[in-house]
Structure formats: C-alpha cells, structure tokens
Amino acid sequence: MSHHTQGNLTAECMDVIHRFYRALDACDYEALVAQMTPDGVWERQGKVLRGRAAVREAISKRGAGVVTAHLVQDLVVDRKDAYSAEASMYVAVLRHESDEAPALPVPTPPIRVVQLVRDSLVLTDEGWRIAHKSAKAIFRSGPAH
C-alpha cells in the first residue's frame, strides 16, 4: 500500500465520511455501505448493525417520503497508526416526512438533533473505510429523552 501523509489521510477519511452522509441523504444505500468495511458496525437508533447487509437492510426501511440532510461540521481526523484513524464530528440532522416522495424543495424543518459522531476508520485495499460508527445526541428538538 502506498505511503499516506497526514494531509492525505485527513482528506481521504473526510471524503469517505462525506460520501457516507451524501449517500444516506440520496437514498443510495449501495454507495453508503461501500464506505464501510464489509464487517463494519454502525450503532444506529439504539441498534447495533453489523456488516454491510445488516446496514443495507435497516436503512432500506426508510419510507419513500423521508427527506434528510445530515450537515457535518467540525470534522477532525487523528491517525492511530499506518492503517487506522479516529474521526469525530458534529452532525446536525434535518428530516422531513410525508406519505410519499415529495417534490423538492420541501419546507425547511427544525434541526431534529445535533450528534457528536465518532468513526473508526481503517485502511483497506479499497482505501479508507468506516469500521465503526457511533453517535451521541448533544441537542434534540422537543423534550429530552
């Protein structure tokens, strides 16, 4: 594998993370799971999804009327060693729901949640991929749960 500098590592890991959220918001679930390792883990909505098939199955249950935007901010990447890195970021989530796929644009909803997201990334033959993703809500609209 080629030598990766810190600059390349940061840019490459950021690209994978941004592609993950762009694919999620575009409902392109094949592109989303491609950003994860084959055995990657996503702690999502109280469930632990293990592997690309489990992730694909869980997110494909989103209704056709769901429109989301995941706004990634303050993304920081730290190298652990030559083949692993840790990333953290804030993600603000906007979500619109209707019975069927709406025409865009939809009215801007309030920010539903702001999460502190932590990703563990590993360097694979495919490039950097997300091996583990978890999130902790920092702000949530409505009463705290």
Image: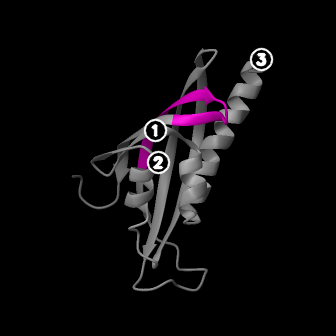
Task: Name the N-terminal-most of marks 3 and 2.
Answer: 3
Q: Which mark is residue 3?
A: 3
Q: Looking at the picture, how far across and down is residue 103, in whole percent?
A: 58, 86
Residue of label 2 = 52
Q: Secondary structure at mark 2?
A: helix
Q: Which residues are magenta?
A: 114-130
Q: Looking at the picture, how far across and down is residue 140, in whole percent?
A: 34, 54
Provide the major secondary structure of the magenta segment.
Answer: strand
Q: Give the Cα separation between the discs numbered 3 and 2.
A: 28 Å
Residue of label 1 = 40
| Between 41 and 25, the one nearer to me in the picture | 41
Q: Quadrant of the N terminus?
A: top right
Which residue corresponds to the image point at 52% horizontal and 85% vertical from the top-left? 102
* Local crowd size for mark 1, using a 10 Å CA cut-off: few (<14), some (14–19), many (≥20): many
| Between 106 and 87, the one nearer to me in the picture | 87
Q: Is residue 117 visible?
A: no
Q: Are marks 2 and 1 in contact (CB under 8 Å)?
A: yes
Task: Name the N-terminal-most of marks 2 and 1.
Answer: 1
Q: Looking at the picture, how far across and down is residue 10, in whole percent?
A: 69, 29
> Looking at the image, is mark 3 or mark 2 nearer the viewer?
2
Q: Give the Cα separation between the discs numbered 2 and 1.
A: 7 Å
Task: Say which amino acid is labelled 3.
Answer: His
Which residue corresponds to the image point at 59% horizontal and 65% vertical from the top-left? 26
